[in-house]
Image (cartoon, grey):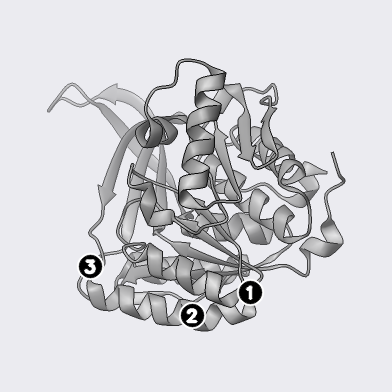
Amino acid sequence: MMPFPADAVSRVKILVAGDIMLDRYWFGEVDRISPEAPVPVVRVMRREDRLGGAANVARNIVALGAKASLLGVVGADEAGTKVRDLAREAGINACVVADSESPTTLKMRVLGRQQQLLRVDFEEGPGPSCLARMEEQARQLLQEHDLLVLSDYAKGSLGRVEALIAAAREAGVPVLVDPKGHQYRRYHGATLITPNRAEMREAVGIWQDEDDLARRAQGLREQLGLDALLVTRSEQGMTLFSQAGREHIDAHAHEVFDVSGAGDTVLATLAVTRAAGLSWLDSVRWANQAGGVVVGKLGTSIVTAGELT
């Protein structure tokens, strides 16, 4: 594997567009069951907010030593203000669109003794005017960036993803997509997409064996006009499909503590190393290593260049 290109990474500028979330954690102690219902009572001892979704991708990019701009929609609310504050503290250039009618996507998790007991989600899709403003900003920002990352969590911020991909192609900027759902025609013209195992099944159906998967994956890649397609397969590692054929990388042996945000870390590492000049295969190897590190951490986390090297 090629060495991590730290010097080249420091010159890389990546635009991340997609569904921005705030991940809120309430940590506490549990020592009794509620008299009102058969549920544990959590005495909250600590609260923590972290960037999630597309914002976590941007946070990982900065942690690896590159520069990141973040484009998406947040509400005109406390959570939206917190996203901006956390982005600024992380060194991310936040170019977010404020939606006065919909709240910031918020995932609140309650943990007792490091075990997640409950998750509460607050979310509504952005309106058409917000998407139009996002598209306008993207066209301007693409002129200043080396690569576009689209982080799709199906929350609505990529409702006009086709226009964003077309704008990137116009600007000569490669596009990496973390997809959602089964309507993959939306991503036509991207450079690479990174479905996980379940998302790949949604897109191409259940494969019988590795040869069948290769046929389906290469068919999808050609249909969408992609340079490459990366299937992330959890404990089975990652499989890269390109014009050169199929390359498989086994997962690193590790203890899995929490998979929250692992896909964000993989996508960020892939984007950073590819923009820094590595081949797809070497970029995937570094992304695989980063994914192996981040699943050993609690909650939505990052991996630094120091941890990788």
Compared with 134, 256 (above or below) is above
Looking at the rendered structure, the kind of residue marked 3 is: Ser
SS of the residue under disc 3: loop
Q: Position of residue 76 (x, y in %)?
A: 29, 74
Q: Would residue 100 be found to the left or right of residue 5 on screen? A: left
Label 2 SS: helix
Q: Nearer the viewer, residue 216 or 11?
A: 216
Q: What is the spatial separation of the Cα atoms under label 2 and label 3, in whole angstroms?
A: 24 Å
> Which residue type carries mark 1?
His
Q: Which residue is mark 3?
A: 102
Question: Residue placed at 58% from the left, 33% from the top?
Answer: 295
Is residue 91 visible in this depiction of the protein?
yes
Q: Amino acid at mark 2?
A: Arg
Question: Which residue has dot 2 on it?
Answer: 139
Q: Which residue is mark 1?
A: 145
Crowd class of label 3 (few under 14; some 14 to 19; many from 20; radius 10 Å): some
Give the mark nearest the N terminus, 1 or 3: 3
Location of the N terminus by quadrant is top right
- Give the residue drawn at x 63%, y 74%: 145
Do the residues bearing badges 1 and 3 touch, measured as CB atoms within 8 Å? Answer: no
Image coordinates of residue 96 in percent, x first then y, are 43, 74
Of 177 and 9, which appears nearest the observer?
177
Percent across and percent down for residue 27 are 43, 40
